[in-house]
Amino acid sequence: MAGFKFFSVVLTVCAVCVLVECKYMVYNTSGGIVPGKLNVHLVPHTHDDVGWLKTVDQYYVGSNNSIQGACVQNVLDSLIPALLADKNRKFIYVEQAFFQRWWRNQSKDMKKTVKTLLNSGQLEFINGGMCMHDEATTHYIDMIDQTTLGHRFIKDEFNIVPRIGWQIDPFGHSAVQAYLLGAEVGFDALFFARIDYQDRAKRRDEKKLEVIWQGSKSRGSSSQIFTGAFYAGNYEPPTGFYFEVNDDSPIVQDDINLFDYNVEERVDAFIAAALSQANVTRSNHVMWTMGTDFKYQYAETWFRNMDKLIHYVNQDGRVNVLYSTPSIYTDAKHDLTEPWPLKTNDYFPYADRINGYWTGYFTSRPAIKGYVRMMSGYYMAARQLELFKGRNKLGQTTDSLADALAIAQHHDAVTGTEKQHVADDYAKRLSIGYKESEDVVAASLDCLTQRECKSSITKFNQCPLLNISYCPATEVDLSGGKKIAVIVYNSLGWKRTDVVRIPVINENVIVKDSTGKVILSQLIPIVNASIVNIKLYAAAYMGESLSANPTYWLAFTTVVPPLGFSTYVIASGKSSALIKPISYTFDGSRNVNIQIGPGNLKLIYSGNNGELAHYINSRSLVNISVEQSYSYYAGDDGSTDLVNFQASGAYIFRPNGTYAIQPEGKIPLTVFKGPLYDEVHRMISPWIYQITRVYKEKEHAEVEFIVGPIPVDDKVGKEIVTQIKTNIGNNGRFYTDSNGRDFLERIRDYRADWDLQVNQPIAGNYYPVNLGIYINDRNTELSVLVDRSVGGASIADGEIEIMLHRRLLHDDGRGVDEALNETVCVLNTCSGLTVQGKYYLRFDPLGEGSKWRRSFGQEIYSPFLLAFTEQDDKWTNFPVSTFSAMDPSYSLPDNVAIITLQELEDRTVLLRLAHLFEVGEEKDLSVMATVELKRVFPKTKINKISEMSLSANQERIEMEKKRLSWKVEGSNTKRDSDSRGGPVDPVKLVVELAPMEIRTFIIDFNSSLVRYR
């Protein structure tokens, strides 16, 4: 019987083979939009993180696959032949950091092919920045810079201008992204995936996932952009339609001669998914994002199945399906001429489920957040100095730092949500970029301090670890007659007076200005807490052991012109005021309070317990009670969450109890009182040290903190916060900045767009802070400014809290698969990371704090650049001891900043001017401002000036002509005539800026190099 059955099967197969007519199947993929039908736009894409689980280069070449099987080079290699196989196929690509790596290694023929695909629209660049930047922890200047770097490459290489914003993976979305990195770069639409799960549910029900987003109240309707949030909360295909080689979705098996034929089932599943999406989407157009992380490594598997779906679904006729791009989809929506709902403010904070608030990453990895911010300010100054000398045709430039900073803006970089080895890679790239730019800066300063720039004369050193008191260039024994010359460069467009602090080893020193006059200075001993940090981190990061500890902080007041430098000389002498400490101990019996502050501002500390008690400003007449304290949130380990097991981690903030951090025993208050500033030192705990400074000429308090190593011996992760408590009745309202730009109102336990169901009353009220946070009532406002991205909130009335550091022991289940437990190792001994940083606080009468927030906020972003050189006892001064690129009698208005001044590769100059104030923010400064370019550039003639889009890849007038205008429900059909500065007269060369306006120009000067003498 067995033999008979086998014989029957053979006969049957043979018969089938004889009857089958073999032919090549041609799929009809040529269909376009069909009016009156539901149109399903298939958008093939890959989302390629510029570092996350692997480094950017590991992702590109496909190494370290034990972590993740991902190779972007394979994606791009396989994509081109797949597109060439069918002219109807389309694909979008985003991350220029990867594309440029690939492009550099392609043949002339391949480059020609790619250009053909781009020109035909089969391949389209979307977003176009070097990375898909984060929107919570990035500063707007850095967002502009990284976008510009990508956009200008695309323009120069392909003569293409991206039309669409594609922020599909960042964890919440900022107002600045909408109006500045959306409308102002000329985008017609912005698409993303992640909005709060409660918000998404309501928008699905009301068909309001697609809106017109107006991110700026100051810029009005010109800031509007069509915005779509993906209906499923991700950027992937509907379930069952993943077609990577190793995916488990059913392919479309349409060969009737083979088993598992499933065309009808696949068509029915496709149509069911399309109709489900259509039920929550306005109009007869829906978008399917056909791809996800690092897909299309073998592109043909995706396109083969999409070809079949298009062919068979269109044969079925119930819906229409087509290859598409976000540009085609946007045009289809616009052609409907329908009004859309209006969205204002932003999409923060983001929760993907109950107890899942992505507000921890606002602070995660605070050291790299601080490093990125420090390098950003340095890059701004370095580009200016590079311009003043002339950009090198050969040799070192600031480009390496530009590239490192661009990559660092990625939504798994500065966010702190990457694996540790990837964070190390970002830091390494920044360090390499800094070193090259450091040489550019040194060469520029050498040139600018000489009357002729022919050969190198002076070697200038800089101190990237000055923040931890480590500066070998200034730790020189001056007793033998040596001198230290100090260059203080000011990258801001206004004259600046500030106190400079540098570490020295000699007690008897004097400081002279460029005229040889001895100026007031003071010395404060460097405390042991700082010495411990210096030794550890100099060894960890520099591989160096200290030969001698720096002994004192030398402080002196500098006055520096705009876009210029002043020089000072430190020498042996007996003029500096040596400040000796005053120690106060507290046993509860002392009734006399301690007053700190040599100027208008006085801080009053309690004589009973040493705690901060009052803030008094004799000029503004503010007199208010204030307390400042530290506490920690215990990081939830998720063990009691039997549904999601949600722990606190790199992304998620989920506190499990609040615990005050109190000094152990009677810790003395140590006070240093000097002619320039006073300092108050306090050991809060064995792992928290705080120094508070009050400057004579300033009306804010500077708080420097050293936090770490955070103890976890009790197996509990900790999230460290500081609170400032007052009696201000802010009634649940507080204000945080959007990427350092606009301030947005926040209301505790409230969302304007939906009825918030509160399940995390602390984490759900945290917002990103890049510039500052403030509260107010009818009389007073309290502002806190920061030196890096942090999370902040007002959890109780009268209070502001900011999170300074996090050390956690559990992964939060969002993909990084690693606890946020940063350590530093020296000689095989590891300890938790210590973070050193600053924040600044100030009280003002109601309505008077904005000027300080804006002007001082710009100074925080753009600190002085310091350079040092050692000289012998015969040296007097530089041939050019003071310098300003601007007219010496001119300074920018108080409400305007230069945020970009850079020589481009074609010798033209990129200039950006930003108005710093919002409409109605400040009574005198929220007005139209003017900048006289002839006085900004007095030593050269401007031949031509062209106003550009924000990313400098197209002329602004052309951008405005092309941008789509949308109808808004309940509004006029025409776009408002928003307040903008007028055209720049080529003769007068005066630039006008309206509140919150940024204007970008490319300037052609009358010389091949722009040199200032």
Image (cartoon, grey):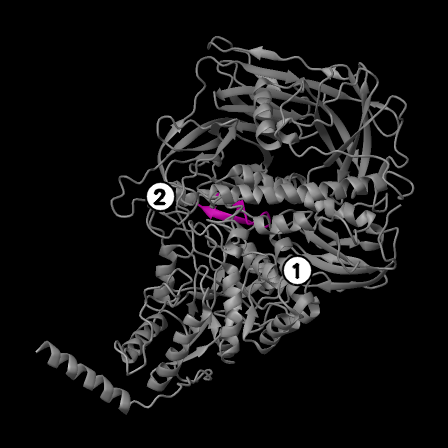
**Horizontal placement of 126 versus 851: left or right?**
left
Q: CA distance from mark 1 to mark 2?
A: 38 Å
Question: At x 26% / y 48%, what residue is drawn?
Answer: 643
Residue 744's place in the image compared with 281, above or below, is above
Q: Mark number for residue 950?
A: 1
**Horizontal placement of 10 versus 319: left or right?**
left
Please name whichever residue, 413 or 564, is drawn nearer the observer in this view of the structure.
413
Q: Quadrant of residue 266?
A: bottom left
Residue 403 visible within the image: yes
Q: Residue 920 appears at what percent x and percent y? A: 62, 51
Q: Residue 956 appears at what percent x and percent y? A: 69, 66
Residue 934's place in the image compared with 697, above or below, is below
* Residue 305 highlighted magenta (yes or no): no
Q: Residue 505 appears at what percent x and percent y? A: 71, 18
Q: What crowding class fits label 2: few (fewer than 14 Cα within 10 Å), some (14-19), or many (20 or more)?
A: some
Residue 86's place in the image compared with 678, above or below, is below
Magenta residues, dominant SS class = strand
For the magenta stretch, what is the residue range? 734-747
Residue 916 visible within the image: no
- Pointer 1 and pointer 2: residues touching (CB < 8 Å)? no
The residue identified by callout 2 is 760
Residue 328's place in the image compared with 862, above or below, is below
Disc 2 secondary structure class? loop
Q: Residue 125 appears at what percent x and percent y? A: 57, 67
Q: Amino acid at mark 1?
A: Leu
**Horizontal placement of 411 versus 986: left or right?**
left
Label 1 or label 2, whichever lies nearer to me, is: 1
